[in-house]
Structures are given as structure tokens and as C-alpha cells.
Image (spheres, grey):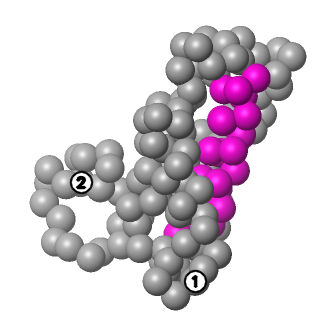
């Protein structure tokens, strides 16, 4: 399993056990692959609903990392889009049509992949 830490702070045992402390490249890659493999005509609403919290959590993890937004306008733009996607007011709800959830998941997965690639490049890790 590929797990990375930016090494910006001393880590305690509690930090290592916290899922938010480390970026799990393989888990995020698997999650985005799973979402992008979904097909609207063969996927149920329940399957899509289960994917929303996980992809939002992965995206939020990457948004908290230093990805060079201070120096790169494209990264700032990606962060703004990601911030909008993880905002609870913009996430799908029970009233959101299935197609709306499908589009949200695809947008979130594609953006998460882009940020994961940037994260991997900045930290000298193998790109997913």
C-alpha cells in the first residue's frame, strides 16, 4: 500500500492512525476508478449515494495539502472548484436526481485524480 505524508510535522501514533493524516494514493486511485467505471444505465441510486461521502473525504484530504497554489493559478482554480464540490451545500441530497449525483461523482472523481497527480508530483511519488 502506498501511503505518503508530507513530513511537515512530527507524527504521533494517534496521527498515524487518523485516516486524514496520510494520503493513501492506492485507496484514492481505487475510489476514483470505481466511480469512473460507473455507468448511468446500469448503476443504482443506492450505489451512487454510497460513493459520495468517500470521494468528498478524499477530495477534502487533497485540498488540505500544500499543492503549490501560491505559485500556480491553475492549482488555485482546481482548489476553488474542489472547495465548491466538498461544500455541504453543493453536495447531492435525497432530492437530487440520480443524474445529478452521477455528474457530481464524475466531477469529484476527475478533480480528485488531478489533485492526486499534482500531490504525487510535488512529493516525488509514483503518479497514480
**The furthest residue to the right:** 41
Q: Which residue is mark 2?
A: 16
Q: Is residue 102 magenta?
A: yes
User: Mostly what secondary structure, the magenta segment?
Assistant: helix
* Quarter holding residue 128: bottom right
Task: Please say if 72 is above or below 66.
Answer: below
* Quarter holding residue 55: top right
Task: Please say if 85 is above or below 43.
Answer: below
Which element is circle 2 on?
helix
Q: Which residues are magenta?
A: 99-119
Q: Residues within 10 Å of mark 1 (few under 14, many from 20)?
A: few
Instruction: Residue 17: give x, y in percent of width and height.
Output: 23, 47
Residue placed at 41% from the left, 53% from the top? 61
Residue placed at 35% from the left, 57% from the top? 22
Which element is circle 1 on?
loop
Can see residue 44?
Answer: yes
Q: Is residue 35 found left or right of 71 in the rendered image? A: right
Instruction: Residue 124: give x, y in percent of width and height.
Output: 53, 79
Amino acid at each position: 500500500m502506498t501511503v505518503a505524508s508530507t513530513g511537515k510535522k512530527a507524527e504521533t501514533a494517534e496521527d498515524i492512525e487518523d485516516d486524514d493524516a496520510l494520503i493513501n494514493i492506492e485507496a484514492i486511485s481505487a475510489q476514483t476508478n470505481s466511480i469512473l467505471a460507473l455507468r448511468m444505465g446500469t448503476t443504482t441510486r443506492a450505489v451512487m449515494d454510497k460513493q459520495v461521502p468517500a470521494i468528498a473525504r478524499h477530495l477534502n484530504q487533497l485540498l488540505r495539502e500544500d499543492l503549490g497554489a501560491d505559485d500556480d493559478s491553475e492549482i488555485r482554480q482546481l482548489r476553488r472548484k474542489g472547495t465548491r464540490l466538498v461544500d455541504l451545500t453543493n453536495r447531492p441530497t435525497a432530492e437530487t436526481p440520480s443524474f445529478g449525483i452521477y455528474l457530481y461523482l464524475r466531477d469529484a472523481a476527475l478533480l480528485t485524480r488531478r489533485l492526486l497527480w499534482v500531490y504525487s508530483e510535488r512529493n516525488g511519488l509514483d503518479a497514480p
